[in-house]
Image (tube, helix red, strand yellow):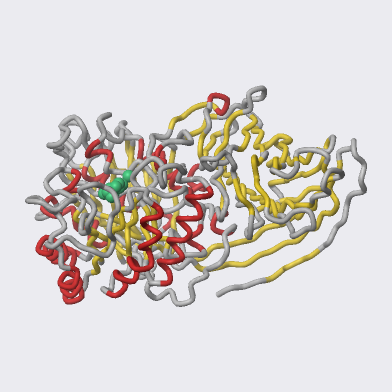
Amino acid sequence: MKKLFNFLFLGVILLATGCEQTASDQVQSPDKQLTLQVGTTDGKLYYQVSRNNQPVIRPSYLGFHLSESNLADGLEISGIHHSSFSESWDQLWGEDRTVDNTYNEMRVEVRQKEDMNLRFSVVFRLFNDGFGFRYEFPEQEHLGDFVIMDELTEFALAGDHQSWSITYDREFYEGLYRKMAISELDTVCTPLTIQTADGLYLTLHEANLTDYAALNVHPDAADPTRLRTYLTPWSTGEKVFVTTTRVSPWRTMIIAENPGDLMLSRLMLNLNESCKIEDTSWIQPGRYIGIWWGMHMKDYTWEIGPKHGATTANTKRYMDFAAKHGFSGVLVEGWNLGWETWKDFSLTQSYPDFDIEEVTRYGEEVGVKLIGHHETGGGISNYEAQMEDAFAYYHKHGVNAVKTGYVGGILEGKERHSSQFGVRHYRKVIEAAARYQIMIDNHEPVMPTGLQRTWPNLMTQEGVRGQEWDAWSKDGGNPPEHTTIIPFTRGLAGPMDFTPVTFNFTNKVLPNTRVQTTIAKQLALFVILYSPLQMASDMIENYEGRPEFEFITVCPVNWEKTVVPEASIGEYVTIARKDRESDNWFVGSITNGNPREMTLDLSFLDKGKTYKARIFRDGEGADWKTNPYPVEIEEREVTSEDILTIPQASSGGTAIIFTI
Ligand code: NOJ
Ligand code: CA
């Protein structure tokens, strides 16, 4: 239920002009711990942020270079308006149901004193868990359509903190996060997660990236803990062509006392607009399997031939398995013309051995949906020309989810995924898919920014170094600590289609590369790495007859509530989530290459109730390198008063089902 109250409009006009002076005002978070001040000095607009009087962001400049004019100096504040807002709203799907959205807002109106007398506003919102701000350009006489050549926003940190990031032009964001001091960063994309010397955790990112270029940051040469903005450019050098959307995305920072609270912040979602889809009944989170890992293992091919994976018979075999084991969908890649050349894919013509009528008829009979696949190879014009027909084609066959792919470093031969060109394209796809009641799982995306609040058919995205790297990466695969870092970096931007649950650790294609975990850790990843479409990615043969697979067949993907009992970035993480449909809780806990003992305080369980805990843990002698397979399944009765201590192997884990 939506509740709106306490909407105040104070209309404080604070400032007289005075060009050399520093004029300022401030806004605080509702709990008064965070304070953001804004002012001008020598005609430059700045903001700064403190937490309990300790600086978090030192004075940092705001502004733009436009093609028409320079909004870096010669500025004055012409008005400041304060207001407050509070509501709670429900997520259609997510890591928790109800989200609190309470903030204090300060709208700062800025005027260029000379040149073109341009006007813009900066709107700051202070939440208890961080802040966001964005620029708005009202319609005005001297500013019709215009071009942003550079956004000048700065984030001057209060110290040379440790941070986790990937470099900005890492293809599709599929990199290993590096831990390094802020001053040592190159140009990095956001989310950028930071740990301060006083034990604060900060995540710099953006929300509601609409018709703009993605945010990246780099240290200032003279003052290297001052991060400066670098928007992903068009191939022609411009950053943003401003036409109808005259507001920037929100620049956001979560401020937390521990890594778990970073994960529980919903600030990014709160800074997106509410749902624009009226009938959402067709948006259904679910578990899926797919004709996929077999291609990576070279048992199957995407293109037609003697080992073609996407055949009618094979799809039916996968659908039978899905129906038997509680999966709602089967992804089928390589069903359509174009895979021989990876060019000019047809998204409405199937290979002759894939009969879509028959597989979707069969799916309906056994209660499993076909999950569609659109690989574009980065050919945007080819895709956009077919898109309506391609979604209509799947819709006609009852398909309500499509995985999209854009393999190729550059879109359309010249533009970056994270440029305004890419941002516009990806939004077009989401909106078109919504018209055909199709959910999207995008594999080479622009970094997510919370758009799923507005378009909840944007279910999940890869845009992460996922489990496929354990099939073909020459560096040996994802190191054990990788999945203890990404929940606190890329994962803070939105759901990740990481595609976990490998049960066979032999890689016959590249014997020195493999999934570097135990089986129990694979189970736990189903809980840890949130995705409302969550894949069990191995070939189905590898799941047959394995008792521990039970965990995957019952683990929900849509949650009432999430808590993070323990976490240390790069070392270990334990997450407990309550099912939306029942009173059951599920826990996933993982460690890096170091064995450890998980100590799990069960106080999150309902008081006074006795639960049956079904525990899937690393078995005797488990070790990711030498013996990844042993899993022990045990049962205990527990209450919220108990503390479980369970040993975890090197790159091991624990998965637990709590039922009443
Ligand atoms: C890369 C994606 O990550 C993978 O999932 C997919 O199978 C291939 N592209 C082919 O589309
Ligand atoms: Ca990929």
Q: Residue at x 61, y 38 (%)?
A: 229
Q: How many marks?
A: 0
Q: Nearer the viewer, residue 531 or 43?
A: 43
Compared to residue 43, the image places residue 221 above or below, namely above
User: Is residue 501 in sight in this rendering?
Assistant: yes
Left or right, residue 15 beside residue 609: right
Left or right, residue 617 beside residue 273: left
Q: Nearer the viewer, residue 621 or 454?
A: 454
Screen quadrant of the C terminus? bottom left
Screen quadrant of the N terminus? bottom right
Hey, which quadrant is residue 214 in on the image? top right
User: Is residue 108 in sight in this rendering?
Assistant: no
Q: Residue at x 31, y 64 (%)?
A: 286
Compared to residue 650, the image places residue 253 above or below, namely below
Q: x, y percentage for residue 422?
A: 47, 50
Q: x, y percentage for residue 524?
A: 30, 49
Left or right, residue 298 beside residue 339: left
Q: Residue at x 82, y 43 (%)?
A: 75
Q: Residue at x 56, y 67 (%)?
A: 274
Furthest residue to the top? 222
Q: x, y percentage for residue 301?
A: 15, 48
Q: x, y percentage for residue 428?
A: 47, 61
Q: Nearer the viewer, residue 634 or 28?
A: 28
